[in-house]
Image (spheres, rainbow, N blue to C red):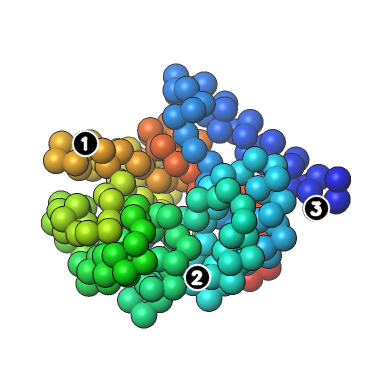
């Protein structure tokens, strides 16, 4: 085993242990939570190692980095999640490799994703990104729609050819009423998910929790956690 592989294996084992403990503490089955490893800023060689170590879900937040990486890793049995703010001029590229876009937050983006998915003859999973620092009907500074905007956006996704409404995603807010209250933020997301599932029962993905707060996300009921730093190390630059 290379040094890097041994290091990633050890980190993965630690994260796995944290998820398992959090599930046990919450009375949940381990299978209820999927680990998505956020590989942004790390090279394709790391993605390949992670795949060898059994990782099946990876996430990226910038198309410029993700597109060549995904192309290099096209032979691997991976699901690619796009988790960054997405401009419509990047949509066509993202739809070429992403299985799920977790950062859907406006109708113009939905239209553009739908057109690209139909053209590529792909079905694209979509999560509505919820901003919990934006007020009911505001928009998050780092993307996302306020809780009041979920229903309308969900209906548009559900009616768009080529798209599948999979659920909700959030990033714990740094400001506003949920600052430093990750678990409360994730519980609010769960309540919003319950509302969403009344109209869209299959949209049951709840993506929440990162390296620092995955326990709180699992406790609240998240189905997917997105972990970067705890698996790959502290990123060399902001990303
Ligand atoms: C970078 C990123 C993560 C992972 O964050 P870590 O703190 O490194 O685990 C999760 N979600 C999103 C949207 C990200 O951009």
Circle 3 — which element? helix
First reached walking from the N terminus: tag 3 or tag 1: 3
Return the residue at label 3: 4
Using the image as rendered, state which of residue 129 and residue 202 is in the foreground.
202
Q: Nearer the viewer, mark 1 or mark 2?
A: 1
Using the image as rendered, state which of residue 54 and residue 60 is in the foreground.
54
Using the image as rendered, state which of residue 159 and residue 211 is in the foreground.
159
Find out whether the residues at labels 3 and 1 contact each other: C-beta distance under 8 Å.
no
Q: Is residue 105 left or right of residue 220?
A: left
Q: In percent of the image, x 70 and y 42: which residue is there?
A: 53
Q: Is residue 39 left or right of residue 118?
A: right
The location of residue 149, given as percent across then percent down, is 17, 58
Residue 78 versus residue 239 in the image, above or below: above
Return the residue at label 2: 62
First reached walking from the N terminus: tag 1 or tag 2: 2
Circle 2 — which element? loop
Return the residue at label 1: 201
Q: Is residue 201 left or right of residue 144?
A: left
Q: In percent of the image, x 44 and y 29: which residue is there?
A: 32
Residue 9 versus residue 40 in the image, above or below: above
The location of residue 232, given as percent across then percent down, is 68, 54
Q: Quadrant of the N terminus?
A: top right
Q: In percent of the image, x 36 and y 66: which residue is there?
A: 120
Residue 181 in view (yes/no)? no
User: Which quadrant of the figure has residue 193?
Assistant: top left
Q: Is residue 234 left or right of residue 127?
A: right
The location of residue 155, given as percent across then percent down, is 15, 53
Labelled disc at residue 158: none
Using the image as rendered, state which of residue 93 and residue 220 is in the foreground.
93
Q: Nearer the viewer, mark 3 or mark 1?
A: 1
């Amino acid at each position: 085993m290379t040094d890097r592989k041994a290091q990633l294996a050890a980190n993965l084992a630690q994260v796995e242990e944290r998820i398992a403990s959090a599930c046990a503490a919450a009375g949940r089955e381990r299978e209820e939570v999927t680990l998505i490893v956020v590989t942004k800023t790390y090279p394709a060689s790391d993605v390949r190692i992670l795949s060898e170590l059994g990782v099946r879900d990876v996430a990226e937040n910038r198309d410029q980095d993700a597109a060549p990486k995904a192309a290099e890793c096209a032979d691997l049995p991976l699901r690619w999640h796009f988790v960054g703010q997405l401009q419509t001029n990047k949509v066509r590229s993202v739809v070429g490799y992403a299985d799920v876009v977790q950062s859907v937050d406006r109708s113009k983006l939905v239209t553009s994703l739908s057109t690209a998915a139909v053209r590529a003859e792909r079905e694209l999973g979509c999560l509505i990104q919820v901003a919990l620092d934006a007020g009911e009907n505001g928009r998050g500074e780092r993307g996302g729609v306020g809780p009041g905007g979920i229903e309308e956006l969900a209906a548009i996704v559900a009616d768009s050819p080529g798209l599948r409404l999979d659920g909700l995603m959030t990033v714990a807010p740094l400001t506003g009423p949920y600052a430093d209250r990750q678990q409360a933020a994730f519980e609010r997301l769960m309540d919003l998910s319950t509302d969403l599932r009344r109209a869209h029962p299959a949209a049951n993905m709840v993506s929440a929790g990162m390296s620092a707060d995955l326990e709180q996300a699992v406790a609240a009921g998240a189905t997917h956690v997105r972990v970067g730093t705890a698996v790959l190390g502290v990123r060399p630059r902001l990303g």
